[in-house]
Amino acid sequence: MVMGSSGSKLEKALGDQFPEGERYFGLENFGNTCYCNSVLQALYFCVPFRDQLLEHASRSKGSGETDDNLLTCLSELFTQINSQKKKTGVIAPKRFVQRVKKQNELFRSYMHQDAHEFLNFLLNELVDILEKEAKASSKPTSGQVHPDKLANGTANGIANGNHPHPVVTWVHKIFQGTLTNETRCLRCETITARDETFLDLSLDIEQNSSITSCLRNFSSTETLNAEDKFFCDKCCSLQEAQKRMKIKSPPRILALHLKRFKYIEQLGRYKKLSYRVVFPLELKLCNTTDDAPGSEAEYSLFAVVVHVGSGPNHGHYVSLVKSHNHWLFFDDENVEIIDESVVQTFFGSTQEYSNNTDHGYILFYESLEQKH
C-alpha cells in the first residue's frame, strides 16, 4: 500500500476536525477503472450500505464461511479501508476489480465503461447473492415469490395471505422504492394502477433545468392515443387514456441517474449532453402518491459521481462525497477536501461547447426521515 502525498495534505487540512474513526483512502486505477472507483467511493460513504458490508465481513469471518463472490470481495475491501491504521492513503481494490471482470465480460476490456451500468450491475449482483444466501439458510417454500431484482422491474409479489413473503434483502431496504404506474381510461374513467420497484431512477434532462423539474417531468401525464391506445379491461376495447408515474414509496437512499448520453439518429452514435441541471443539497420529493401538504419526502445530497469529458466513449469519472459535514473530492488515488460551494461547479453548462466538461452523472440522496 502506498501512502499518497495527498493523504498527509488532507490530514493537515482537516487537523483536529478529522472525524474520529473515519478513513479517507484513494483507490488505485487499474487501467480505466475510474468508473468502478467513483461508484465505490459513493457507496463507501453511504453509511447504511457500508455498515451492512462491514457486518457481513465480520459474520463471515466468525463463521469461517467465505464464498469467493462479489459480496465477499466488496465487504473485504470496505473492511480493509475501515481498519487501516493510517487515516489517509491509497488502497488497491485489485481482488474486487478482478472479480467484477470475471463475473461480467462487459467490464473486461480496458475501454471506457459506464459508471451507471456498473452501479446497476453491482446492486443487482449483491441482491442475487443475498437472495441465494437467504434461500440456503431457510427451507425454500414452493412458489416462493421474489421481488424483481432489475433496477426498474415490476413487483411480482401479490399482497394477499396466499403468497409467501418475498425475500427482502438489505440492498432492497436501502435502495428500493416503489413507483405506481396509473392509467386512466378517458372513456369510462377507470384507473388501473400497477406497482413497479426500482433501485435507482433514470431521468431525462433538459437544458437549464433542475432535478426537481426532471422529477416533475418523470411524473407528468402522458396521453395514449392513435397507435398507443390502452386496452381497457372495463370497456373491453382499445381506448384513449392518460398515464402517469408517481413515487408510491420513496427509498431510504435515492439514487438518481441523469441521462447525459443520448443516441443521435443522424450521427448514428451517442452524444454527451452537457446541459446545466441544478441538483440541490436538500431535495423535497413532491411527486409522491401522497398529495397531502407537508407529505413531501425530504432528502440530503451525500455523493455525486461526475463524468469528466466531452463524449460517452472516453473521459474519466470522479466523485464528490459528503462525510461528517465536510465535502471531499475523490479522483482515483487522490483525495482532497473541497468547499461545499464547489459542488455547484458540476451542474453542467448553458453553452453547448464549454471548457467545463465535469458534469454530475449519478446523485445519491439520503432520506432525512429514515436517517436515524
Image (spheres, grey):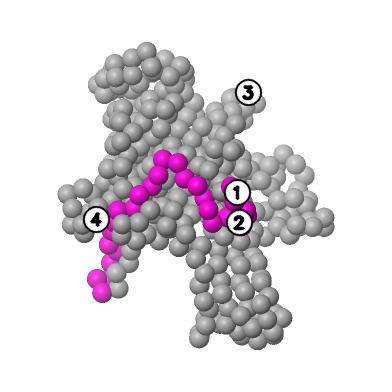
Q: Which residue lies under the disc numbered 1?
A: 295
Q: Is residue 112 above or below residue 237?
A: above
Label 2 neighbour load within 10 Å: few <14, some 14-19, many 20+: few
Q: Which residue lies under the disc numbered 2?
A: 291
Tell me whether the residue at label 1 lies in contact with that at label 4, contact meaning CB atoms closer than 8 angstroms. Answer: no
The amino acid on which the numbered mark 4 sits, given as a three-letter code, is: Thr
**Rendering coords of residue 256 (x, y %):** 45, 50
Tell me whether the residue at label 2 lies in contact with that at label 4, contact meaning CB atoms closer than 8 angstroms. Answer: no
Say whether residue 273 is magenta. Answer: yes
Say whether residue 210 is magenta. Answer: no
| Region rendered in magenta | 266-295
Single out the mark in the foreground, 3 or 4.
4
Name the residue located 60 percent from the left edge and 48 percent from the top edge: 295
Tell me whether the residue at label 1 lies in contact with that at label 3, contact meaning CB atoms closer than 8 angstroms. Answer: no
Closer to us: 35 or 275: 275
Q: Determine whether the residue tagged by mark 4 lies in a helix, strand or loop.
A: loop
Spatial CA span between label 1 and label 2: 7 Å
Label 1 neighbour load within 10 Å: few <14, some 14-19, many 20+: few
Q: Determine whether the residue tagged by mark 3 lies in a helix, strand or loop.
A: helix
